[in-house]
Amino acid sequence: MSAEGKESSEAEERALLRVREARKLFGGFAAVDGVSLDVREGEIVGLIGPNGAGKTTLFSLITLFLPLTSGAVYFRGQRIDGRPPYLPARLGLVRTFQITRVFARMTVLENLMFAAPGQPGESLAELALAPRRVRAHERRVRERADELLRYFNLERVRDQYAGTLSGGQRKLLEMARALMTEPKLMLLDEPMAGVNPTLKEELLGYVLDLRRQGMTFLVIEHDLDMIMRISDRVVAMAEGRVISEGPPEAVRQDPAVVDAYLGPGGQARAAPVDPGPPAGRALREEGRAHG
Amino acid sequence: MARPEPQAAEPILEISGLRAGYHDLEILRGVSLVVPRGRVVTIIGPNGAGKSTLAKAVFGLVRVRSGEIRFEGQSLLGLKPSQIVQRGLCYVPQTQNVFPNLTVLENLRLGGTLLREGVERRLRAMYEMFPILWERRHQKAGFLSGGQRQMLAMARALMLEPRLLLLDEPSAGLAPNVVDQVFAKVVEINRAGCAILMVEQNARRALAMSDWGYVLDMGENALDGPGPRLLADPEVASLYLGGLGGAREKSRETPRPGAGSEDGAR
Amino acid sequence: MSGLLAGLVAYLASFLTNATLYVLFVVGLNLQYGTTGLVNFGHVAFLAIGAYTAVLLGVHGVPILFATAAGVAVSAVFGVLLAFPALRLRDDYLAIVTIGFAEVLRTVVNNVQFTGGPQGIYGYAVPLRDLGLGYQAWQWLFLALVVALTALAFALTEYVVRSPYGRVLKAIREDQEVAVALGKNIVGYKVASFALGAGVAGLAGALLAYYYGAINPHNFEAIVTFEAWIIMVLGGTGRNWGAVLGALIYFGLYSATARYAMSGVGAIAADRLAALRIVAIGVLLVVLMIYRPQGILGRKEDLGLER
Amino acid sequence: MLQFVATGVVFGSILAVTASGLSLVYAILKLTNFAHGDMVTFGAYVALFLNLALGLDVWWTLPLAFIAGALLAVALDGLVWAPMRRRGAGTVAMMIASIGVALALRNALVFLFGADTTRFDMPVQPKVPLGSLPVMMSADDWEVIVAAAVAILGLHLLLTRTAIGRAMRALSDNAALAWVSGVDVDRVIRWTWIVGGGLAGAGGVLYGMTQPFNTNMGWFLLLPIFAAIIVGGIGNPYGAILGGLLIGVAQEVSVAVLPTQYRLAVGFVVMILVLLVYPRGLLGQRSLS
């Protein structure tokens, strides 16, 4: 932890994503209430917090799915809020969804090929005037897609409708599809939700492997063990605000985070039943052992 | 660690080997639990452990693949929600649990839809238990505060005098002192003879007031035991809190500033 | 004997021409709904615009080739105009707006002078008619023209649908938010898809006008749109071959019952039998939607997987 | 000018009756029913049959047409909509099916009654001036307005004062919660069709009282009816009443400046304008309250 001070001083210039005082009101309710955070190149940042903390809303604000009420979002030094929602992906910022959203009535291969950027064949003029160029580019896109299908072990279902895939395969497809956009930063929204332990390890492996190849991640995850294992840094949110931020170890120690998850401390206050003797020491030790 | 003794009272709800999920995502992978008549049982577990799915599965809102759900000895599988309600098991969902464009009174009357007689008697009982609802009876439910809505949702479910009330995270999104009020009501409801099966994220308070607690992890039973003792169980912390448990004691020493004094009406 | 045969041959030509024109018309609808997911319940409007534009220009001395091209272009332009308000609308609103557009257009055509009002227009020049061929030979020649143009439109839309461009259209149909999240600017695609479909319908309209030799507002009633929908869903939405199959089945059934509908059966007058035929069409549509919404060629998952 | 407003109010109240039924069906079933106009036609022809063949006074046919419309709607639900709901059909599939129902229903009526324009056998009443205003209205005009008002008042009382009305509002508010609160959803749906179909049937009779009609009347009414519910806010029967009156008056007043044939277009244009300015309609969306 000795490097902490140095890290924060370098944070500004190295930040790939900077969110400043992001706020989102729904009616009078602040779903995101003045959130600032940075994600630096090559990092895996975990975003945690109880249900309703505003994590997914924050994702939607960063990817311009929803307009900010106030605040700013910078990606690679460029201010992007207020710009059209297709822009982030073009700049290298792509997200996945809590509940997977694949193009059900398109094949797995089509799902991937669709996401590739800069395709000349997406213009009618090019289709008419430069069919050869379109075909050549298609070939390259297909090769890249096949590569990813191999990487994610989806070759067998390449030509199936994505709607026929299992839940786990959909997760992988969504991640592969996001990778087709050649992103710098991936926002993963609960990649482990509803996933069996084997696939969880597999997904974890992919994230770590991609990071080794230079990818940056911001990950919402409820599986705290998982998030502690993969994150360089953890940001905890509750009720629309950042309540704690730092290395996993520090966030884990933060009483505010524990309170947010377990309910505020002092459980005896309103409890009509005697809570019994505290077992703090044992809990702490057990907790460390699991950390 | 010694296993707690089996519960003594006669079971009102028994779930065994329940597997359920959406599409091809299996959220529950074999859950079993028992609610004794007249007791409070709480299910806790990290987000995504399948707590809410369990509540929905009991109510037939999620397709059950295998396993059994018995209420007073009879299977609930394949029944319509209205039939389940009729048998004496009522449900309060986590969110959107009132009809915002209906008045408080209309919400309550709707809760009593299946009553053939005694609607007025139940209304009086509900107003007695929740005086705020009497004051607001002609207001649209959409204008109530979060805590008041939760009270109304519980009252609506209680109109039918259920023998078991299923609560899905009654404390979600409420300010701490409102949570206190809600939990106090839950105890009051229980003392009036209604068994409670509660799904909660707020483990500390929920377990403290429960006769029995179950911890779910990844859609499976992880631990169970008497509520307060379960809360003290070190294994719970490791399962439920991931690596966070170590901070627990520290947090008790330094309570969050203002945590208990926020105004309830947000 | 030879008279009977000649009658049969002529009948076959008219059957095939009608069916092919509908294939063309449905190819346009299929691009809009089957591929891109835009509900268009007023497709007949573009048929009418193509027909009237081509005929009116022809009457005023514009060569047929240019008049026909103008019919396509004007239809496409109206497609763009209608697409803009429609872009933000949900399926049900879009359905109502398109129906309304078609009905209002028909009202206008019925009531202005230059379209000939309810009497319509007749006696205009028709392609290939001045080659000095007999009517029957012309019929076959014209059929060949219709088939050739339909095949061309068919091939071009297939090319587009199978291209990266078509992939974007399909992604819009499946989940437009995700398409945007992956970096595609979808607005232009939706407008273009609607306009292209309208243009194809405009071509069908011009050819229809040439084939009939006379047009009036009665030719462009809402039922024509719904016939196109039946043909599309019969074959299976999103598949152009489905349009061919659907048109053959639909016109097959239609012709099979035509003799009775023309002459009546016993005491039942012809117009009542025609009505009964439309009752059957309606029932067919309902039964199809209940039991096989994905159509005959459609895969089972085509509709079952909607979200 | 005032005369056009008066005629518009008469037509508008008929629109209000039919549109509120359609809106109710949408609110509870989320079904955009393109066959609603032909259910209006059906009501008119049931009344025509009772009036011409059985010699019943037209006013007496009004409740009978209501019942016939309700029965038809319930039957169609059993034959078409319930199976589609069970199979989880999408909104577009339901819309296409409703087109099929519309075609079948309309042409069944053509088959039975022919396509010619017809009218009820009822005494022609003189139009008399309304006080000192330059407005002529017949007794029938007034009666149509009163009947429409009674129907709408009945709908209002049903929605606010009865258990089934409360359940309807609950179902449109939050279907999932209604489902788990013990509401018998099948029963509410049945009543929704009874009311929606009944109002369509009765609306058809009211229309027939004001002018000659043929089997196409429902199709021509469909656009103004949809314009009314969209202007008022789709799924809100009270909005449909407001929208019906607005569209009715707008269409008739347009006759002062445009050829009468464009009345239909006027309603449509008003609808487009409202959609552009208030995408959710004047009284908002999806609420029965």
Image: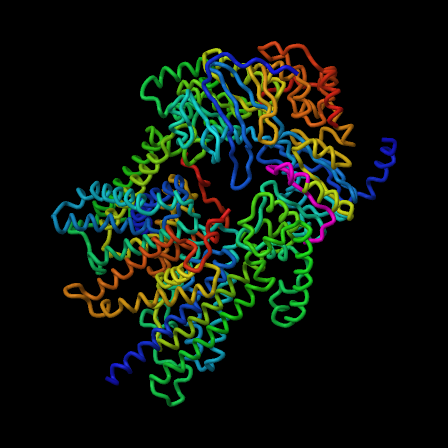
Determine whether, in the image, residue D8 is placed left or right of residue A27.
Answer: left
Where is residue C307? Give x, y as percent: 51, 46
Where is residue A191? Give x, y as percent: 65, 40
Tell me the quadrant of the picture where the N terminus of chain A can be found: top right
Determine whether, in the image, residue B50 is placed left or right of residue D10.
Answer: right
Instruction: State yes or no: residue D263 in magenta.
Output: no
In the foreground, D162 or D12: D162
Where is residue C292? Give x, y as percent: 39, 53
Q: Residue at x 52, y 51 (%)?
A: C88
In the foreground, B143 or C243: C243
In the foreground, C268 or B34: B34
Tell me which segment is drawn in magenta. A180-201
Instruction: State yes or no: residue A183 in magenta.
Output: yes
Determine whether, in the image, residue C90 is placed left or right of residue C104.
Answer: right
Tell me the quadrant of the picture where the C terminus of chain A can be found: top right
Determine whether, in the image, residue A106 is placed left or right of residue B262.
Answer: left
Task: Identify the residue at the far front of this view.
Answer: B2
- Relative height, residue B116 to residue C28 (above, below): above
Q: Residue at x 40, y 78 (%)?
A: C143
Tell me if residue A259 can be seen: yes
